[in-house]
Image (tube, rainbow, N blue to C red):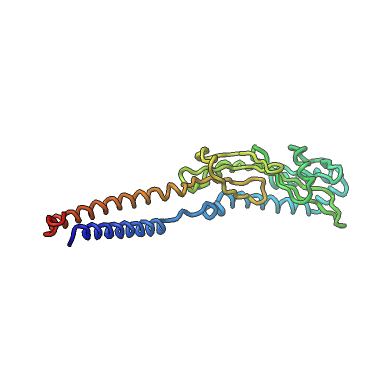
Amino acid sequence: MPPKSILRFGLILATALVLLAGLVTFAVFQSRPQAQPVAEEFDKPVMATQIEFLADAMQRNAARIAAHPQTLACFATAAPEVCQAQAANLHALNQDAAVLFVTDGQRQLLPGFLPGDTRRLLASAGRGGAVATATATFNLSLSHPVMGSDGKRLGFVIVEQSVPQLQALFDTLPLPDAAAYAELQQTQAGDASVVLMRRGNQAIKRNVHPTLIALAGTPWQIAVWRPVTPVGENVASYVLGWLVASLVIAILVAATILAVRNRSPTTCACW
């Protein structure tokens, strides 16, 4: 075979092998394990379920108190002895919770009830309907309207209870990645939020958008940041592998072609 034909054959062979290596590399890249989205992994953590269960229990408790005949009598008469008797009953049932009865309109506290953080709770109850608020000391406050027999709103029942287990629950929150970061946030007026607790690598907040998990019935939410490897970094290793494989193929093909050319009987006549 003439030397030019040998070289042409070598170039064609090397090109075909390099393209084949590229196809194999692309197939391996496409078949690599895909990371699960954070939203799926953090659909409903155990912590969120437990906090939502507590908030739901408090809301149902507030609704029962609002519909109780003695509560309605307290609102209808505003008599100190009636309100104080109901206050004693509620305190005996749950000594860890503070219960406030707030009249509609002037929003005055009825006698016999602990005021607590009166200004904040009254402002929250004034929004109407069932309202949830919280403080940085992890007290959860829920309000429920009190309706008279004529359908007229008489006021609100406000139940405030401490959630001391919140820190322990947040500490057990599983992070989706060793480099992930999570915050327990409390929503404020507008779009503002206050960070109550944090865990993990805070530096990744600068480049990654969080996944938000609302805790129903509370003003709290879990924000999770998970580090994302840029597409360029994912592809770079595979491209580098293909270039190395191409170099090895070129060297092997060149060595083979040189060996064949040197052994060809027509080499000396044509070279």
Q: Is residue 211 left or right of residue 55?
A: left
Rendered view: 197 above or below 65: above
Question: Which of 2/109 is in front?
Answer: 2
Quarter of the C terminus within the rendering? bottom left
Rendered view: 1 above or below 247: below
| Percent coordinates x, y for residue 40 in the rendering | 53, 55
Which residue does the image show at 42% across and 49% down from the upper left?
Answer: 234
Q: Can residue 96 be seen?
A: no
Quarter of the N terminus within the rendering? bottom left
For the view shown, which residue lies furthest in the bottom direction? 1
| Percent coordinates x, y for residue 65 in the rendering | 76, 51
Which residue does the image show at 55% across and 53% down from the upper left?
Answer: 39
Question: Which of 7/30 is in front?
Answer: 7
| Percent coordinates x, y for residue 143 in the rendering | 75, 47
Q: Is residue 263 left or right of residue 80?
A: left
| Percent coordinates x, y for residue 46 in the rendering | 55, 51
